[in-house]
Image (cartoon, rainbow, N blue to C red):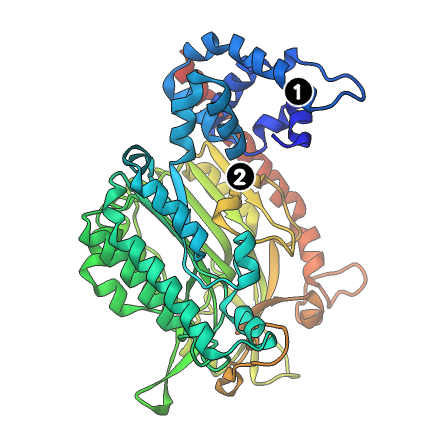
Amino acid sequence: MHASAREMATNPLNHSYHKQFLPANDTAQESAYQVSFAVLPFDGVAVSPGQSQDAVLPDIINASQSCQGQFAALPQEVEDLILKYLFAEDQKNLRSVSKHFEEGATKQLFREVALWTSASSAARLQAVMAHPILAGLVKEIKLYAFVMSEESSLNEEPVSRYRQSLQLRKRGRDTASHVQELQEEKRRFESFLSKLRVLRNLEGIFINFSKSYDVARAVPAMPAEKTFRHERMTKIFEALHLHGFKLRKLFIRHLMNFADEVLVASEAFKEVALSQLEELHLKVTQQPYCEVVNGQPDNRTNWLAVFYPYLLFEWIAPASAHLTSLSLYSDDLWGLIPGHSWTGLHFPRLKSLKLGNYHIGHDDQFDWVLAQTTLKELVLHNCAMFYQMCIRRDDMSAWNISTRDWVLLPDTSTPEYAHYKYHGRWADCFRKVHLRLQLTSFKLDCSNEDDEVDPELTSQLGVHLSSNRYTNFLFRDFHFEDLETVVDGDTDPNTQPLAEPVSGDFFSGLSPVPHDADPNRFGIHDYHCYTHNSDFTALTLLDEAVKERARQERARRDR
């Protein structure tokens, strides 16, 4: 353990050390935490003022050995949970100091392995795959399917393909040298896939792309991002299919919002990714790209316009019968645009649903969630309701935007745009969840502006009524001439956002709702205050009901 971790661990009052990485409100993991704290011997070890943290380690080790009998009496499932939520370094230490923990800690250490694009990472993974026992312990593998820069490879930190291209240009690297690096990385990746069969108990794949943009013009040798991602995912699913794997868990970070019809039509994808999938976790990187079709400038396919219907019908619906856990996240707001309904979508076994950056603008938009009566866990991460919308009139039909439940506001300053107001409230949503779902875990939270919204980070969330729960919505006209890729400078190329939340000032004169200072103005901040009491009351009742239901379930299991 690090010095600070040792200090926290040796303080018997500091429960946060043992608990901080456990998902809140999860009853099984909460029980494991309680048992581990009861039997871990840290409360018998004191640290004197000025005493070295390393000086108390022998006492901790001796105390740990003395309580092995207590651990031996624990159910194996509970002990496995305790070991699972330790730091990897602590798991390694346990293997060294305790024979009792050696087998369990080894199982946890090698349960999940990773393949970065560096040669050193590939060598470490090959060593695991060559060991008959360790190879059999691997249940999940993380594949970092992007190219690393020389500097970041030392620390194995990801960089976007765009930033790598800039680094290469600044260092004066020639294209031939970079092509060789790409070929070496591709060879290592394909070598791993060819030996995949030895990971005989593999159940889950984590594919992590960088959040980057098409940089084919920045570095001519670098493949277009869409082609690169298609090739990587195709090779992964073909290798899994060839070796007879059927995934139970699939996690893709920064899935580009491109409708890859070739991939989803393949037998490998259908057999590996959809036939028996129980957990699907997706984080979409949302890019408003268009591409010319058949060389005709006026024949364009807009990625964003077709992606979410594609995601629903080609990914989610085919796997819905088996899914027990589903995470749908995007790095930008989604849910309202483009207009399409998820009504009728049914998950007969779904226990956990996590939504990130999901935005609501219709009364029935959340009904598909409420219809999943088997749910036990619901996470709403950076989710919001739209209060006022500004949309270009010409885009209404092109994007299949419905104005049901909206009130048209009079405005003559921007005639090409239509301004609407939506009267939806979170209080109504909370009441429906309270009445229709039997949850034992519920989280509603908003991350800081600089924090990443990611399905892996939900253990850090709580139940908080954020001032960002309502937002205004500006749907910008999309200009195809904005697609020119920027290759100079230090920032990623980006087009103007197609849709974005905006401040209340933009809409300050559009809503004739009473305001203390001006009866003709009602900004977004005022709407937060106006709805606070009803939202807070409904959320409190929901939270209390969820916690009481979780307590009752724990009591039933303990009897």
Label 2 sits on residue:
459
- Decide: few, some or many residues near mark 1? Use Cα within 10 Å; few <14, some 14-19, many ≥20: many
Quarter holding residue 315: bottom left
Three-letter code, disc 2? Ser
Q: Position of residue 175 (x, y in %)?
A: 47, 79
Three-letter code, disc 1? Thr
- Among numbered discs 2 and 1, the one appearing first in the sequence: 1
Which of the labelled discs sits on residue 10, or is there none? 1
Front disc: 2 or 1:
1
Relative depth, front residue between 508 and 260: 260
Does residue 5 sit above or below 384 in this rendering? above
Residue at figure coordinates x 47%, y 18% from the top left? 98
Q: Position of residue 179 (x, y in %)?
A: 42, 74
Residue at figure coordinates x 24%, y 40% from the top left? 200
The answer to whether residue 338 is visible is no
Residue 324 vs residue 546: left or right?
left
Quarter holding residue 462: top right
Does residue 242 sit above or below 174 in this rendering? above
Quarter of the image containing the C terminus? top left
Which of the labelled discs sits on residue 66, or is there none? none
Q: Position of residue 160 (x, y in %)?
A: 52, 65
Residue at figure coordinates x 46%, y 7% from the top left? 69
